[in-house]
Image: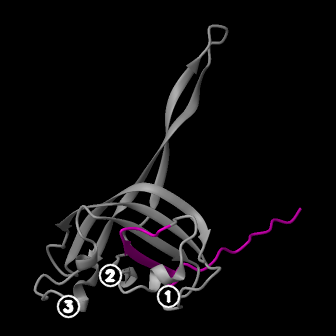
Amino acid sequence: MATTSLPGGPVDDTLTVWWVPGGVADPASPKVAELTAATSVDISCYLTTKTFGLKTDANKWERKRRCSSSVFEVNGTLKKTFEDLEYAYDPQAKAGDPMNNAQGALVPMSIGSLVIRRGIAYGTAPASGQFVQVITGQLGPQNDNSPAEQGDYLMLQGVSPTSDNPKVALA
């Protein structure tokens, strides 16, 4: 029997990430207008390729029975964590400088939504019907993560997710 290998979608240049301060009104049905609003910031080109992603782990416990010498694991509650955001910034740029749009928008301890669109070329305008992931959460403090030699000045910032809508269509 022949084995079929199905191709996946291309990854390069097909990720767009918006930060929506205060969060989208309805994470299950985000609006294009929320992504194109003056308060929303496209942080895609500031993010490094090192970070980005939501991780879900199940807290496991053991199930033992007196009638068996076997012990089985059982999945319990789920724990969702988001990798720290790592993004470029300029420590000498003045307030409002486009080089620091991500740093300025990602205000420590603020609440908002990361809206992530995958599989559509970067630069393509958001449109109704496109699928996105909406992660609402609170940002942590900003910490310099710049390399000692050669490279960009980088900021590292945690995200504590409070909700996740993994695949919803823009309205």
**Amino acid at dot 2:** Tyr
Residue 147 in picture, x, y percent from top left: 18, 73
Q: Is residue 62 magenta?
A: no
Q: Nearer the viewer, residue 157 or 139?
A: 139
Secondary structure, mark 3, is loop
Q: Amino acid at mark 3?
A: Asp
Q: How dense is the environment of label 2, judged by Cα within 10 Å: few (below 14), some, or many (20 and up)? A: many
For the residues marked 3 and 2, what is the alpha-carbon distance in whole angstroms?
Answer: 13 Å
Q: Residue furthest right?
A: 1
Residue with the most extreme top position: 66
Q: Secondary structure at mark 1?
A: loop
User: If you read the primary sequence from the N terminus, does the residue marked by circle 3 or circle 2 appear first?
Assistant: 2
Picture coordinates of residue 134 (x, y %)?
Answer: 50, 66
Find residue 97 and name its label: 3
Q: Quadrant of the N terminus?
A: bottom right
Disc with the residue nearer the chain's start (3 vs 1): 3
Residue 20, image quadrant: bottom left
- At 28% across and 79% down in the image, what residue appears? 102
- Disc 2/disc 1 C-alpha distance (Å): 13 Å
**10 Å neighbourhood of mark 3: few (<14), some, or many (≥20)?**
few
Q: Name the residue rendered at 10%, 86% in the picture.
A: 92
Magenta residue span: 1-25
Tag 2 residue: 46
